[in-house]
Amino acid sequence: MSSLAVSPPVVKAKSLSCPNCGGPVELRGFAHTLSVVCPSCHSILDASTPTLTLVQRVQEAQRIQPMIPLGSRGKLENTVYEVIGFQIRDIVGEPGEGWSEYLLFNPYKGFRYISEYRNHWNFIRVLAALPEPTKSRGKYAIRMLGQTYTHFDHADAVTSSVLGEFPWRVKVGEMAQVDDYVSPPYMLSSEATPGEVVWSLGEYYTCAQIWRAFQLPDRVPRASGVFANQPSPYAGRTASAWRLWLWLMIALFGITLVMGFTSTNKEVFRHSYSFTPGAAGEPSFVTDPFDLQGRPDNIQLEINTNLNNNWAYFNFALINQDSGHGYDFGREVSYYYGTDSDGSWSEGKSRDSVILPNVSPGRYYLRVEPEMDATATPMQYELVVRRGVPVWIWIWLAALLLLIPPIFIKIRSTAFESKRWRESDYPPSSSSSRGGD
Amino acid sequence: MSGHTATCPNCGAPVNFRWSGAVQTTCEFCHSILVRTDLDLKKVGQVADLPQDSSPIHLGTEGQYQNRPFVVVGRIIYEYEQGGWNEWHVVHNDGTSGWLADAQLEYDLSFWTKPPKPLPPFEKVHRDAVFQWDKQQYRVTSVTRAHYKGVEGELPFEYWDKHDMIFADLRTTTGEFATIDYSENPPLLFMGRPVEFDDLHFKNLREFEGWKQ
Amino acid sequence: MRHPLFLAYGLALIGLLGFGEYRGWGPTRANELRDVPRTIRDNPGAYRSHYGGYPRYIGGK
């Protein structure tokens, strides 16, 4: 197969003169450009004919200075694009809420857009796909090519300033109905004019990424607030934090089992007594000695009484017979019950138990001094001492403390999402905030 | 695919056919529109100077779609109220041909398809109308009235004396694409998909000053 | 490793718990005594409780 005898010439940018001011106009979008703004007088010119014709003279309050100058080239998604157009879109009824759009061009890959709002950026391309209206968590949403985007806001956008070239006919003052749907980091937008609806998909970019892509020299500005499709730094972290919590709880449960099976839990003393309040003689007494063996560990003292609508107070001293060291403490046991108009009730318990931590091994005895109301009936009670019992309260405390990090992350994530949706048409109310991850 | 050579009846230059199914072609040198008859070529018209074009594709560009190589052999330039677009006539090795719509470098590749059932009449076609084919819902996304701005290369039919044409574009939620050409009777159906530049693995593209491919 | 701090915190907590259980740590404290004379065994009444100031139970519901 022979090749073409006449191969097409290299495409060059056309240089023309502005019909309004005579200044030079270069068409860097080649033959795609339908409208171009004269760089000198800022009139909008029709570029669809071989010579330029005037479309609109523009009165400008001030010179607009795009953050990325026209003619800049940058690499995004592995392709070099040139900034050939720029426009500012304002929202009808909300002055100061507008955003900027940059038109990017590559003669092979085509056109893309980057939008900028308060230093939040999006890299956008037009989609040729059909949306399906749907609902997501009670909010109006769109399903497009397998992904669901939740409605974020609606605005009437008006083009207020233009610079550079466009592959369509632009006019200052032209209006479109814009709807945004988000699925961070993506934002699906629809632009409706009386003639048609155009869908486009944007991906969030930070200022730093854009500055790096276009190699802009000045300092990277900071973005303010949370943008519609800005990815959450907590995305997925809440779920993974809870997963780690689950593993830690399993480890905690494991330790608990080990504790339960390996604790000494040995009964070293048990004796029954009776006490008659008001009886003559010394109420205090000392028990027979008992041995506490092994490493320093806790002991548990259990008091079982037959108290019946009464109280008793016990002064205890656990004394090491050899060293004279010991511990001094008191316990109160009270148990009351009855019935009234609401049914039966009870208060307190007829038994008590206390754990003394870190008791060194040795030979010990207890000094006991009970007290009761002088008129009370005599009490029968039993004292039981166990060595090395498991202390369950620490397990509960650890379980509680383990909850702190995942709850903290969830709170931060919800706060971030609240900030995001505050800018939308669905700001979270103070009474109920439905933040997602 | 045959490489058949004939002679231009107007200027005598050699005319190469890349495609055996070509009914019409243009002479690269004198831009005459030539139609194949049983014996030889007949001049039926003249192409006016083609409008300025910045598509990276030109006649002779090669590409590949889903592992099937193709060559660009012809082109129709359409113009409508809001601008224009190219329809590139692409041909596979086995002789089957398709259309690569190129509108501001957004591409849709479609092939003539025998309609699975009678196509909706033109009166029923408007934006957002829905039709069911192949168990899929096709929704009309645009109805465009366009006319020829120019032709180039090998085309499967005689494409030079039509005036206004009406196209209805339809899409599905899964990315299928269809076009109905209502300028013929019965209307013609073309079905396909939007395609990315990278997915077509082009070779032999145009060069642009200041741009690396 | 998405949560290195959380993991370190959790393991430290569980480790501390295990060690505390091994040493028998408990939440309650008792006053420590020193040099309790052996004579208390013969005369328990002579011992003065350091845990003074017991608020007498008022009684009743």
Image: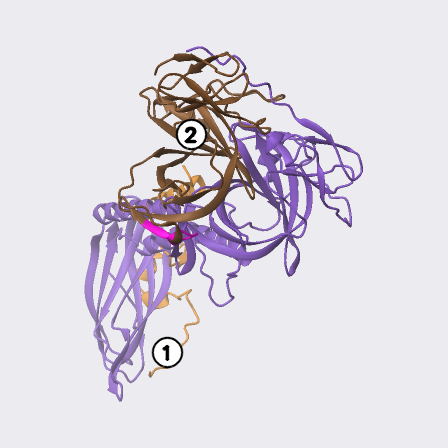
Chain colours: A purple, B brown, C orange
Q: Amino acid at mark 2?
A: Glu
For this rendering, which residue is in front, A408 or B44? B44
x then y, percent, for residue A313 = 32, 72
Q: Which residue is mark 1?
A: C57
Residue B100 drawn in magenta: no
Magenta segment boundaries in residue numbering:
B124-131
Contact between marks 1 and 2 (CB within 8 A): the answer is no
In percent of the image, x 34 and y 23: which residue is there? B67
x then y, percent, for residue B26 = 48, 21
Residue B74 found in image quarter:
top left
Residue A131 vs B55, above or below: the answer is below
Q: Is residue A161 left or right of residue C6?
A: right
Residue A250 vs C30, above or below: the answer is above
x then y, percent, for residue A423 = 56, 56
Chain ID of residue with mark 2: B
Q: Which residue is mark 2?
A: B158
Q: Amino acid at mark 1?
A: Tyr
Residue A93 vs A246, above or below: the answer is below
